[in-house]
Image (tube, rainbow, N blue to C red):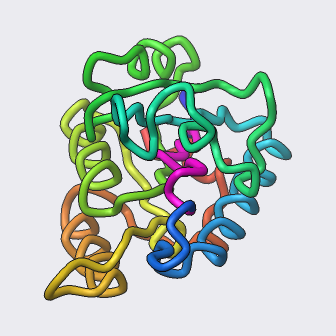
Amino acid sequence: MSKAALIVIDVQRGMFAVPDQPPHDGEVVLSRIADLVARARETSTPLIFVQHDGGAGHPLEKPTEGWGVHPDTGYRAGDAVVEKRYPDAFQDTNLQERLADLDVSTLVLTGMMTEYCVDTTCRRAFSLGYDVVLASDAHTTFSKPGINADMIVRHHNEVLGNGFAKVEAAADIEFKQYEALQ
């Protein structure tokens, strides 16, 4: 039987390291992700953390402290990790092979940089044939000139939920229900 996996995208220490520009609802989003991680563990749902390597001088440069998975996600040493260099968590990584080995057909997505890595990974997963569930309140980003982060998150929930993903609040996500989607 195929199953779901929880994918935690780029929730790294460096994303929370700039005190005058925290991610929108960052602490609340971390709490929701930690809850999803705990529930995934309770149901033996595969769990994969994705880490972005931003390259030399970037806040997410490997192997600096900023590159590490944020400890408030519920991450544990030994958890599955996929390292990436592009917004698409599938590009030049072994994510698809790992998911195939686990017989995963549904991806529950959470994470950082809604308009970049969450969006791109969601669309790519859909194009690869996965059923995608986007945790509407467990992804976030930063405000930009001319648009605040809350608007970016809401906009992407609307756009991605209109054909690329099922959009659900984190509290409503039950991993075992997705086994029947395929």
- Seen in the picture, residue 27 relative to 46 is either above or below; the reply is below
Outermost residue on the left side: it is: 146
In the rendered image, which quarter contains the N terminus?
A: top right
In magenta, the rendered stretch is 5-16
**Residue 159 falls in which quadrant of the image?**
bottom left
Give coordinates of residue 70: x percent, y percent: 66, 50
Q: Nearer the viewer, residue 158 or 152?
A: 152
Residue sitting at 62 percent across and 39 percent down?
A: 65
Residue at x 57% of width, y 33% of height? 64
User: Count of labels shown?
Assistant: 0
Going 74% across and 42% down the picture, which residue do you hit? Answer: 75
Where is residue 137? Give x, y as percent: 51, 75
Side of 24 where 87 appears, left or right: left
Q: Quadrant of the C terminus?
A: top left
Compared across the picture, whether 114 is left or right of 135 comes to left
Q: Is residue 8 magenta?
A: yes
Check the image and report above or below for 141 versus 63.
below
Say whether residue 7 is magenta: yes
Residue farthest toward the right in the current orientation of the protein? 42
154 versus 10 height, above or below:
below
Q: Is residue 92 left or right of residue 142?
A: left
Vertical placement of residue 182 versus 23, above or below: above
170 vs 114, nearest the viewer: 114
67, 106: nearer the viewer? 67
Residue at (43%, 12%) from the top-left corner?
97
Please state the horizontal and vertical placement of residue 178, each as a whole percent of the image: 55, 48
